[in-house]
Image: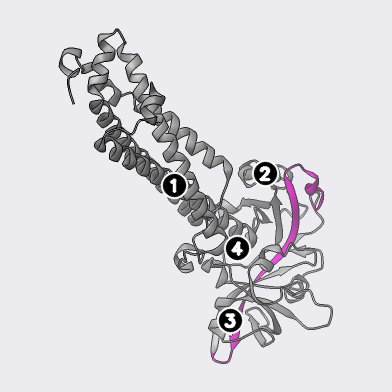
Amino acid sequence: MAKRLISASGGKISSSAVKIAVISVALSVAVMLISMAVIIGFKNEIINKAVGFSSCINIVNRESAENLETKPVSLEQDFYPSIENENGISKIQPYIIKPAVFKSGTQISGVALKGISKDYDKCFFERNMTDGVFQVNDTTGGKKIVISQKMADLLRVNVGDDLIAYFIQNPLRMRKFIISGIYSTGLEEYDKLVAIVDMAELQKLNSWTKNQVTGFEVMIDDFSRLDEMTELVRDYAGYKINEDGSMLKISSVKDNNRQLFDWITLTEMNVWVILAIMFFVAFVNMSTALLIIIFEKASMIGLMKAIGSTNWLIRKVFILQSLYILFRGIIIGNVIALIIILLQYYFHLIPLDATSYYVDYVPAEFQLWYFIAIDIATILIMSVMLVIPSLAVSKMQPAKVIGFK
């Protein structure tokens, strides 16, 4: 009977109501899917940038100051590099941080020089280069440096230019670097601060040996296991007292970027609000369409009751018809969302202000799991909620509605 009702053309009122219901469900599902794509894209993009700058887990001397002045840590550690053999840990790499002041003409800028080794994972910076190449470990004798686009704009320099760095220490020192590349990530807090140089140069400036560094960066395979891996690294390195009495401090990227991750959490909450609103909109329109169909078929309902059909049997007929409308809307919504997500993913059609949103376009990421999850949730929730408007069938009396048109 539900199939017969679906194939029937229906009245003008019910036909319009069905079309509106299909469009409403399609748009609601599309908005939910696009919202999930955007929040997942935002989350992954920002996490990748934060991890690219400071790694997943950081190991430093507990006595290192918050003003970038660091105490050295020895490279001769029990966990380096053997911790890479642990399941879930992909890489550990040493680094050095040293504050400096850049001067170019009349322009000056305070920065944090990050010294890296030859085996440092450069993929993150290479993906974000806007000019030149990522090269700091040079064997030709020149001191190379990679700076951000913000620094380049402020200091009015380009690739190939000389850049003077002053180091506030006793005695005052300076070094001349050659700009080999310029990067831009959109994370303004880091872009205006971090420049990359060879680690050996900073060891000389600090009068450190080749076995002394600021700390270690630990990369993991699965970011969802960050807390678990942080505890693992802490067990390896966080509770050991060195011969000189110093201890190591273990912190995760979440600990070091609390404000950034709080912002991500806030955007996730907004998505839940959007999902709730879209479910409500779809339910209201589906309920309206179902009630219109029920009242339009009032005489048929009265006839079915007269020949002995139960209320639940009749209600199931109309619920099944509503589910058909629901499935049509879900399929259309999936197609619309997929097209928009893929267009944004490949062509970045919708731009953003990077200073406010950390990225210069709306990131949209397609993942099959949330398509399936939202589709199933829509079907289950709507199937249960459509039982409510179908109760109108129980209120109809055969004697009053058989002749109703």
Residue 229: image tag: 2
The residue identified by callout 4 is: 65
The residue identified by callout 1 is: 30
Amino acid type at mark 3: Ala
Give the label, 1 or 4, closer to the camera: 1
| Quadrant the N terminus occupies | top left
Residue 152: image tag: 3
> Between disc 4 and disc 2, whose residue precedes?
4
Question: Residue at 49% of width from left, 67% of height from top?
Answer: 354
Whether 105 is among the magenta residues is yes
| Quadrant the C terminus occupies | top left
Q: How far across and down, in percent of the image, does residue 203 sit? A: 76, 72
Question: Residue at 55% of width from left, 82% of height from top?
Answer: 153
> Between disc 3 and disc 1, whose residue precedes?
1
Region of the chain picked out in magenta, as a range? 80-106
Q: Quadrant of residue 225?
A: top right
Residue 142: image tag: none
Residue farthest to the bottom, as pictured: 105
> Between disc 3 and disc 2, whose residue precedes?
3
